[in-house]
Image (spheres, rainbow, N blue to C red):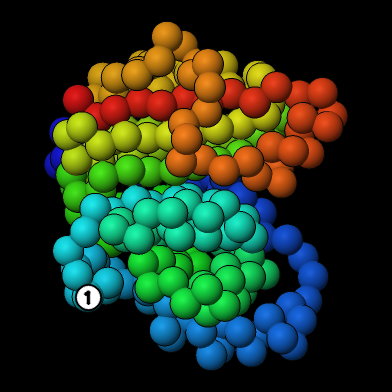
Amino acid sequence: MNNEIESLHLRPIRTFVVRAGRMKPAQHRTIETLLPRYGIAVSPNVLDVNTAFGRVAPLTIEIGFGMGVATIEIAAAAPEKNFIGVEVHPPGVANLLRLLDAQQLNNVRVMNDDAVEILKTMIAPASVDAIHIYFPDPWHKARHHKRRMIQPEFTALLASRLKPGGYLHLATDWEHYAHWMLEVLTAEPALQNTCAGFCQTKPAWRPTTKFETRGMNLGHGVWDLLFTRI
């Protein structure tokens, strides 16, 4: 399976659009001064995670951390674990760096690039204990569904990077996307659902995000999915 994943030509369609707008001077300064400390540079080589963190510890990767508020809460509550946050939007990267510096957390590293390419080239197969994807863009218009992050090819890649017994945790406040995710993840033979369909309650480690609160205020439900690597 791993050889097949390595040779996959995942769809060139982007699952994200980098938002227009200028970075504030303070955000630029934050990235310039703090990314060398907390960041991991994009490389064509497989990442030595133990060297990147200076220790051996369980690894969680969060894809699309937004402004990093939930990332900080999760990492602060689990200092015994290492976390890599991946985000394409520089303002979010700047905010997470600022939060890390303010709380002096040393168990988080930040990457500002496409998660697909990072997973394909820098993350070794069967090396990750957990992957979090919280409230990804639902691309709710039918003509944009091809841009949704959770697709069979990407799900297979995610599964290949998890250790046996490692977990994949997703959450969304869009019901159609929730059922889409459930169908795609259920079809992946390397993953097993730990819930009977959707989880009845969200796992304790996931804090309530601003996106979740916004959706609840709009009358949306919130759906958590938790799958483990077989």
- Which quadrant holds the N terminus? top left
* Image coordinates for residue 63, horizontal then vertical, percent: 48, 50
Q: Residue furthest top?
A: 196
Q: Is residue 118 left or right of residue 126?
A: right
Residue type of the residue flagged with mark 1: Gly
Q: Which residue is mark 1?
A: 54
How crowded pointer 1 is (Cα within 10 Å; few <14, some 14-19, many 20+) is rated as few
Say if 183 sits above or below 29 in the image: above
Say if 46 sits above or below 156 in the image: below
Say if 46 sits above or below 131 in the image: below
Residue 82's image quarter? bottom left
Residue 207's image quarter? top right
* Residue at the image position 51 percent from the left and 84 percent from the top: 34
Q: Nearer the viewer, residue 112 or 199?
A: 199
Q: Is residue 46 visible?
A: no
* Residue at the image position 58 percent from the left and 71 percent from the top: 99
